[in-house]
Amino acid sequence: MDALKITGLRKTYAGGTVALSGVDLTVAEGDFFALLGANGAGKTTLINILVSLVTKTAGEVFVFGIDHEKDLDAAKAKIGVVPQEFNFSIFENVRDIVVTQGGYYGMSRKDAEARADVLLKDLGLWDKRDVASRTLSGGMKRRLMIARALVHEPKLLILDEPTAGVDVELRRGMWDYLRKLNAEGMTILLTTHYLEEVEQLCRNMTIIQRGVVVKSGSVHGLLAESDGRRYRLTLSSAPNDAQTKALAADEVNAAVAVFTLRSDETLDALFERVHGAGLRVLDVSHAENRVEELYLSTLAK
Amino acid sequence: MPNNIPLNAYLTIVRKETNRIFRIWSQTLLPPLITQSLYFLIFGAFIGSRVGLVEGVPYMSFIIPGLVMMAVIQNSFGNVVSSFFSAKFMRNVEEIMVSPTPNWVVLAGFTSGGIVRGVVTGFLVFLVSFVFARPTVAHPWAVFLFLLLTSTLFALAGFLNSIFAKKFDDISIFSTFVLVPLTYLGGVFYSIAQLPPFWQTVSKFNPILYMVDGFRYGFFGISAIPVWQSALLLLVVTAGLIITNLTLLHKGIGMRQ
């Protein structure tokens, strides 16, 4: 069964701004799915329609087969959402925020408290359970919103830029936690601007631009299709003019040269070209994240 | 997990609202006590001693039901308008909106919070009145009925105000320009029987008059308007507010883009 099936989704805001112009999207149950797009592409509008913060202009939405239009409350019960901006009460304490959210989903106080305690421990917020939410650090606030979204054990977790403003160590910890949830069977849909996140976590992705889907498929499949890979080579010394010409690099900056390889070119051939110019390769790395290349080339088309 | 959405969601909202009232008691419960005590002191004790009997009741005793009702009205209204608008403004109302909590439960929960604050404040003001007089209650059922109807009606009015409010100024406009004048002109400090016939007729368009009059009947067994008429009018207005609020919530007006 599809966790999410969206067809022909449109949204035009009261002022006439068109946010979505007919989006089709399917997320399979158990998938880890990325929704990409520039700021203003319509990602947050799409998520807000799913959780009824925004009303759609047209289209159909099914959540685990439940028609959004016919039984919105049952559809919403399946979803947990982590919004882009902090939207909890700054006056309430951490545990109360999670427990109260459980209540809104119909959980008894006892059940919600037990579940909140497990989540706060899992997400490293147990020591902060009794402090006012406003005193938490940015990373802790993000984790609080994840705990809040999970309290009712949703089948579909939606995260709108969950790692924005989170330091590298915490981000890796969050990735591990999301991988664990996904491995346990939870379907996850996330939007992010960290394209490394997509390559690390997601199996399928969709890129939307100006309210329409411009590319969709498996992350690996789309990467294999993409033209050219860019590598950054640290050379044994800065090339002179003749060596620079022989290297035919995209750009050379002191001893660092950036190359683009066609899909039929091998790294061996590149290394031979460097050796032929009388230089050695000390180090090699991706010049850009591969998903980033795919993303930028898709948006440029 | 056996979930009971209407009941547990309702209890969650009421608990949250009640905790808020008692957590910030110096902003919610103390100010009306101080204000009403000053009214008792100035109008009741200082000036009232020279007024004599009103409808056969000493003036100090006569104003007790009106001052209790004034506290109930302002606090049941103020609680919902500030709590629900703050939730909208800080966007934590989204916590409820993304959940399967039905609209009628949202309305019932916030209204109950307003009723709790109205009733608790009214009771505290009533206790303070013992410092100045020895109030008696002739018909407890009428006191209870009008207390409940009034706090419900104004909690619902507060909800309606906060649905339309877009900024903090919007939540004080109704209170300043409508609620306060109607309360003062609703017979809190006088009996409409004392007014000329024309102003008696005008006063009958003021819904607060019916609340104060019915509530006063509960204390002294006297009323300027038949009690059943007052109760019926309040019931009709309450029903109208429930329908209006639910319709607006259903359409998402002021809530959803």
Image (cartoon, grey):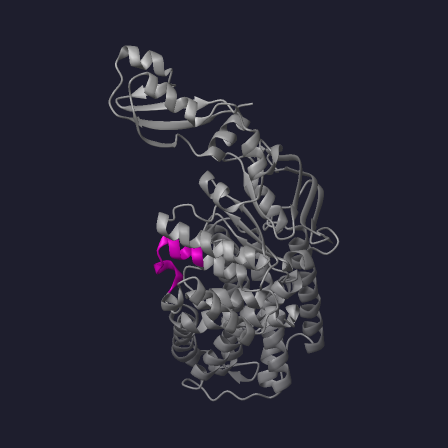
Query: Considering only vertical position in the picture, is B95 above or below A285?
Result: below
In this rendered view, identify the residue nearer to me: B177 or A151. Answer: A151
Left-right relation of B76 to A246: right
In this rendered view, identify the residue nearer to me: B70 or B5. Answer: B5
Quadrant location, the C terminus of chain B = top right
In the rendering, at what x and y percent does residue B245 appear? 65, 58
Which image quadrant is residue A283 in?
top left
In the rendering, at what x and y percent does residue A19 appear? 60, 35
In the rendered image, residue A140 lying in the magenta stretch gets the answer: yes
Residue lying at the far right of the rendered structure: A70
Which image quadrant is residue B131 in?
bottom left
Q: Main secondary structure of the magenta part?
A: helix
The residue at the point 58 percent across, 46 percent down is A47
In the rendering, at what x and y percent does residue B158 appear? 56, 61
In the image, which residues are magenta? A132-143
The residue at the point 57 percent across, 73 percent down is B191
